[in-house]
Image (tube, helix red, strand yellow):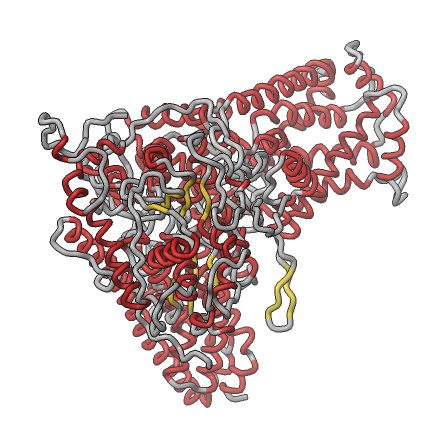
Amino acid sequence: MGLDKLLRKKKATIVRRWFDVVVDTYPVDTRRFLKSQQDPFANPVGRTTMTGLKHLYDGIVEGMDRETAATHLDPIIRIRAVQDFTPAMAVAFVLDLKNVVKSVCNEELQRGDALPEWLRFEHRVDALALTGFDIYMSCREKIFQLKADNERTRVMQTFARAGLLKIEPEADANSGAK
Amino acid sequence: MNNKYMISFIAVFVLFFLAYLGTEALGLDVLFGVLIPYAALAVFIVGFVYKVMGWARSAVPFRIPTTCGQQENQLGFRQNTLDCPSTAGAVVLRMFLEIVTFRSLFRNTRMNFREGHKVSYNLEIFLWLFALIFHYAFLTVIVRHLRFFLEPVPKALQLLETVDSFMQIGLPVLYLSGAALLVAAVFLLLRRIFIGNVRYISLASDFFPLFLIGGIAFTGILMRYVTKVDIVSIKQLTMGLVTLHPTVPEGIGGLFYGHLFFVSILLAYFPFSKLMHLGGIFLSPTRNLPTDTRATRHVNPWNYPVETHTYEEYEDEFREKMVEAGLPVEIMPEEQPAEEAEADSPSEEKE
Amino acid sequence: MSDLPNREAFFSNIDHSIPTAKDWMDTLPVDIRKGIACYAGNPKSLEYVGLPNPRTWSCFDEDWQLPENWQQILHEGFKERLEKFRSFKVFMDICVRCGACADKCHFFIGTGDPKNMPVLRAELLRSVYRNDFTRVGKLLGKIGGARPMSLEVLREWWYYLFQCTECRRCSVFCPYGIDTAEITIMGRELLNLIGLNIDWIATPVANCYRTGNHLGIQPHAFKDMLEFFVEDIEDITGVNCMPQFQKKGADILFITPSGDVFADPGTYTCMGYLMLFQFLKEKYGLDITWSTYASEGGNFGFFTSHEMMKRLNAKMYAEAKRLGVKWILGGECGHMWRVINQYMDTMNGPADFLEVPVNPITGTRFENARSTKMVHITEFTADLIQHNKLDLDPSRNDHLKVTFHDSCNPSRGMGLFEEPRYVIRNVCNHFYDMPRNTIRESTFCCGSGAGLNAGEDMELRMAGGLPRANAVKTVHEQHGVNTLACICAIDRAALPPLMEYWVPGVEVTGVHEMVANALNLPGQNERETDLRGEELPQLEE
């Protein structure tokens, strides 16, 4: 069986393990909640991650454009960008897919003829990881922009209090509502 | 290995052997059969009353019920009188359902969600279910045990026993409540041990009562179905206790004293532990108060006057600017007494 | 990648953030992170209102410059509060740690930090309570869940007590009604005894005390602001909506959070109030006044201590009494309404100088507010709509697809669910509620309440607001919802960045902004734009 076929066949197992790897980046005591709570509203982190990974996996196996990749990757990274992760930790889970596939498809990969397909697979994962860095950075930039907006509003208000400036509703673009 | 539950487990084990060996080997039947039960009961009653009095002594300064439904209104929107009760009767009903059906805990359980076409169940339903089983089984067991303290045994009690054993399994017939108590205790225990975040929040004092109650149920079942203890002697002992003429009949056996010692420990431990939720739930201000705070004034017994920034101080500080802006003032600047010095920001206030 | 060590080995060198399965008490010292913690209170603000131990300090420093006897102060403060508040004492004793609350907290859901489980937040205090006030706890020590107060424990308190928005969601699900808000309120009171507060609370408190509003805007500037709005409204509608200030003998005193006066998009809600009052004045002669003295409905004192809450709240009744109004009308605000509904009358009442609120236009007697004598503006407006007293053209809101965020305090501290929904349904044609377990009594907090809507804790706010944003996203995707309505000034400040981060394309609005956009003012021009100056969609002929 070719690697691609195998990846399709073992989708459920691989995605599940990939999900477990992502969840394992959270504190031990939080993991069960992330895994077991199925309600997407009670558990947005777990559910968003699961949904995103499924789509990403399909995309990696079947091929997808950057836009699509970003659409599915964004929600996961967006969450991790405000949680207690270093930048590397926030995006490393993409690369973890390689390890998952290696362990699930170990036997097939030992065969030499799987190499071209593996290389293509690996390339796609790498590309996705890089996209992940882009998304992570844009999320962080957004956070800092929101912080800056907040500060700016405060400064404006200080000026206004000192009578140096009259705040007009337009000028007081609070909290980045534009 | 988690030392919290190991310590509790070992403690319960040690307690059992203390009583077992104490009576079997050392013949301390009087100590375990009479003195400790009396002492435990005394500690329970005094401790319970003391604790509840302690709570009751604390004031209820504000009326802070958690509103979980539509408020009372004059606009024709249907009030949710159960979850937002504004009358005493409705509060009683809310409390009643809370205590009898664990309503808030049930709210926690949403039975299923659909993911794709699969319906998945939330484990939380089991928390509610087993909590309910646990408490009702415990209650039934306690009531059933009244037969050891009453002579003659009332009809109602006999009826309860009949209901409790309606399955007619085994000989002597199995009481469902005893088995249910043990099963529920085990469930609650396993939940604490195996569910990560519940283990995280659990203390040794959460495991200990579960092991203890599990131990009570287990020894009870063992006596009834396996070792078949001498019920007549036991009743002699218990009737002696309750009539204040304690006697210690021969040949009751260490297992029973282990059982009795567990119960004694539970009684004595009760007032100092989380088991006091039995009393506390009646005093929980977020549940036992009506949601009519805007309609009926609640009085705070220790309300005290505080320093405020009065209008006069405010006007004194900003009078000129207010006049300039055309805001009405109490005292026009011209009319002001000359002594009005440039009052700095009033920073003299102290608590 | 394959010739590098595997990820676990690789990252274990650089990652220090994953706690292993340890007892929670063993995870000290807590790592106080930037982006989560807020800056310390400005000493000038603490001094101004007489809060103890004012000094310049930072929670990121080693030395917090605590008073020498800080442990004793905390111990005595703890003791005093146990006697004064049955809630506190009972909640310290009866928790069975069943875990029902654990996953109900938006901060736990969003951050994944297990210490954000409400039960754990309470255990931070309970552990000290057991050590200090129970014999068994003292005897058994750690195995009994007790631990003495220490600098490390204090840091943990600080960190997690300012990761709670006092939203009360956990108390809905607790079988004993244990309310973490109550625990957090007490914990913060204790912290304040040794001068530990955050600036986003302390400075608004001082400002509010002095000038009547949380930004410290002086009376003339407050009036200026409203006059700007009047000008804007006149540009849009051609009608002058000039309000009255401090008018003695007016029928009604109106108090709203000052956030509505100074911060977008609350300002549009404020314009909405002005237009509604103008309409009612013109049509029915409603006599309503604003006050620059009592110009803050919001009460950051509530996030400081009961005493501070009372000191700030006192202005409402004082001003109503001075002006001789009949009753008070309150604007859209969250914690302001918790304070009014559950505390004000008790603290600063009885308001026997006021009358039972009667809507002079419809004759409705607000019996549910007969003692406190203060009515919520959505109750008032809903009543007007029910009696058909407003001239509304909801089609002017046709470009809005609206959902409603139940603010925590009016939900779980008041029970105000139908009134705002009724108003919304009558002023706009497209309304979609979010999923049931994210609204009404189960509503998710904006993540920025209880004084946490500072800038430096943006990561915390975004993580805490995730469950709310996630539900908004659902209706945004399903129904094309583009407007998130709310009745809280903090929401109006906090939700725009939250939406910008999680659900771009959703704007935040107050309910009365939509009321005003739908309201036909007598003598108005043909409206071309809404209050935000955005062109109205083509109206169907």
Viewer-nearest residue: C42 or B91: B91
Q: Residue at x 65, y 47 (%)?
A: B128
* Left or right: C96 in relation to C530: right
Residue C26 falls in image quadrant: top left
**Is C265 on the left or on the right of C401, as rendered?**
left
Is A81 left, or right, of C146 in this rendering? left
Quadrant containing the N terminus of chain C in the rendered view? bottom left
Residue most toward the top?
B245
The foreground one among C308 and B212 is C308
Residue B253 visible in image: yes
Percent from the top left, x then y, of residue B117?
Answer: 64, 72
Which image quadrant is residue C238 in?
A: bottom left
Q: Residue at x 28, y 64 (%)?
A: C234
* Picture layout, residue B14 above or below residue C20: above
Residue B193 in percent (x, y) is at: 57, 46
Q: So how many labels did they put on this image?
A: 0
Q: Position of residue A58 (x, y in %)?
A: 49, 81
Q: Nearer the viewer, residue B158 or C238?
A: C238
